[in-house]
Image (cartoon, helix red, strand yellow):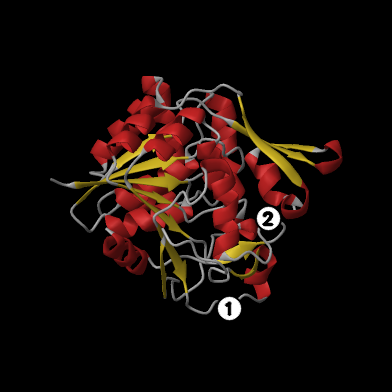
């Protein structure tokens, strides 16, 4: 029987994991964050009232056959400058079907995707950060840009407050043999999933192996000076103590300087404390080169340039399985 794997996350980190795992005989499902409100995704979200397409598009490109990577191409000029072709395609499919899940199912068939893409909710969500001194940040893009999250965050919530999970997301978690969380922006890409009560309950109730893939580098103003243990502590406060059975983290050196240093503060430090019930595995997981965004990418300056190597991270996950 084929092993059922669920990956929880957002765009670049999740798509890298998918690109590696698609080469193995696995049944893959990706649960994708629906709180993005910036750039091309934000424009299309507001225009169509749809779940943001950007993270879904990156994962579709990773799972699809040769040629699917063209979905990530951004128009360089004209009225569509900055829009990725895949975002427009997803918006057109949504307009046709009126359902983001149906739209993704149809596009997955067209591109022969080696897995299933599941938005965490069927309608868009809004991420809200309540900070000290009564301040509030509304929207994923505003929170990502903030430089005081690590020192002033009091509470993170989703709006609508009682939003329902996509039923497919809950079903996938219940049937999973293994659940992979990360890598990705801790507060903007990973935690929003667990702010949906049905998803959090399905995750905690699951007896699947639960693998956390740690980020390569910290994010300025969000996870400064974090070790792997600090990331786990934040997740445990939402999910319960020792939520994971396996933890993977990078041991390769990172060149955090120059342009890279403007977004990433430092390499994530190895675990400073270890729980007996968790298997920790350190390995060289970083890609050899930095990610370079095109000139038409409207948020190129704030994208994390450090990527996991798809082949190495997939091999490490397979060892856990």
Q: Residue 177: give its label.
A: none
In the displayed structure, would residue 252 be above or below residue 30?
below
Q: Residue 222: give its label.
A: 2
Task: Using a 10 Å C-alpha cutoff, classify the residue at mark 2 as few (fewer than 14 neighbours), some (14 to 19) or many (20 or more).
Answer: many
Q: CA distance from mark 2 to mark 1?
A: 19 Å
In the displayed structure, would residue 256 be above or below residue 81?
below
Image quadrant assignment for residue 205: top left
**Residue placed most toward the observer, 253 or 72:** 253
Horizontal relation, residue 12 to residue 177: left or right: right
Residue designated by label 1: 255
Location of residue 150 in the rendering, given as x and y in whole percent from the top left corner: 72, 54
Residue located farthest toward the left when viewing the structure as drawn: 1
In the displayed structure, would residue 193 be above or below residue 248?
above
Residue lying at 59% horizontally and 34% vertically, measured from the top left: 43
State the SS at label 1: loop
Location of residue 319 in the rendering, given as x and y in whole percent from the top left corner: 28, 65
């Amino acid at each position: 029987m084929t092993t059922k794997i669920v990956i929880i996350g957002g765009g670049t980190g999740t798509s890298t994991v998918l690109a590696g795992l698609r080469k193995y005989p696995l049944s893959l499902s990706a649960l994708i964050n629906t709180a993005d409100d910036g750039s091309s995704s934000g424009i299309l979200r507001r225009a169509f009232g749809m779940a943001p397409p950007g993270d879904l598009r990156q994962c579709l490109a990773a799972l699809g056959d040769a040629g699917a990577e063209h979905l990530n191409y951004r128009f360089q000029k004209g009225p569509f400058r900055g829009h990725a072709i895949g975002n427009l395609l997803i918006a057109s499919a949504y307009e046709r079907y009126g359902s983001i899940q149906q739209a993704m199912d149809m596009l997955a068939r067209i591109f022969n995707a080696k897995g299933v893409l599941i938005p965490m909710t069927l309608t868009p969500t809004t991420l809200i950060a309540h900070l000290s001194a009564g301040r509030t940040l509304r929207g994923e893009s505003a929170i990502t840009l903030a430089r005081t999250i690590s020192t002033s965050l009091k509470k993170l919530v989703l709006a609508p407050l009682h939003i329902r999970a996509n039923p497919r997301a809950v079903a996938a978690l219940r049937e999973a043999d293994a659940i992979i969380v990360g890598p990705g922006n801790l507060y903007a890409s990973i935690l929003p999933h667990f702010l949906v009560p049905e998803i959090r309950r399905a995750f905690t109730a699951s007896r699947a192996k639960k693998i956390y893939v740690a980020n390569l580098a910290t994010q300025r103003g969000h996870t400064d000076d974090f070790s792997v243990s600090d990331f786990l502590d934040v997740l445990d406060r939402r999910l319960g103590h020792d939520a994971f059975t396996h933890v993977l983290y990078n041991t390769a050196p990172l060149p955090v300087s120059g342009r890279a240093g403007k977004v990433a503060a430092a390499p994530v430090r190895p675990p400073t404390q270890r729980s007996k019930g968790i298997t920790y595995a350190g390995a060289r997981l970083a890609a050899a080169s930095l990610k370079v965004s095109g000139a038409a990418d409207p948020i190129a300056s704030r994208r994390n340039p450090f990527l996991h190597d798809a082949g190495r991270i997939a091999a490490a996950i397979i060892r856990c399985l």
